Amino acid sequence: MEREGCWRRGPGLSIVKHLVDRMNGEITLKSEEGRGSTFTVTLDAG
């Protein structure tokens, strides 16, 4: 449940990083103050 001013905490990004590493992928982050962050996952289709 997400509420204004309340961040959900947990192992989610850690799990994603582990899976992406195992698939030889890449995670990039774009962060803008006051706007939030965007995580992009890139995987090789081959």
Image: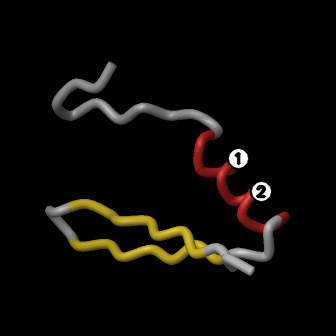
| Of 5 and 19, the residue lying toward us | 19
In this view, the residue farthest toward the top is 1
Dot 2 alpha-carbon crowd within 10 angstroms: few under 14, some 14 to 19, many 20 or more: few
**Residue highlighted by disc 1:** 15
- In the displayed structure, does residue 21 sit left or right of residue 3? right
* Residue 22, x across and y down, in percent: 84, 64
Along the line of sight, which residue is nearer the eye, 23 or 15? 23
Q: Is residue 18 above or below residue 29?
A: above
Task: Check residue 2 in the rendering and tell me which mark sits there, or answer none.
Answer: none
**Residue 14 appears at what percent x and percent y?**
68, 50
For mark 1, give the secondary structure: helix
- Kind of residue indicated by mark 1: Ile
The residue at 65%/53% (across/down) is 16
Quadrant where the C terminus sits is bottom right
Instruction: Find disc 2 in the rendering and name its residue.
Output: 18
Q: Dot 2 lies on which element?
A: helix
Tell me how many marks there are: 2
Question: What is the C-alpha distance between the residues marked 1 and 2?
Answer: 5 Å
Determine which quarter of the picture holds residue 43.
bottom right
Is residue 30 depicted above or below 21 in this figure?
below
Picture layout, residue 26 above or below residue 41: below
The residue at the point 28 percent across, 26 percent down is 2
The amino acid on which the numbered mark 2 sits, given as a three-letter code, is: His
Q: Residue at x 42, y 32 (%)?
A: 8
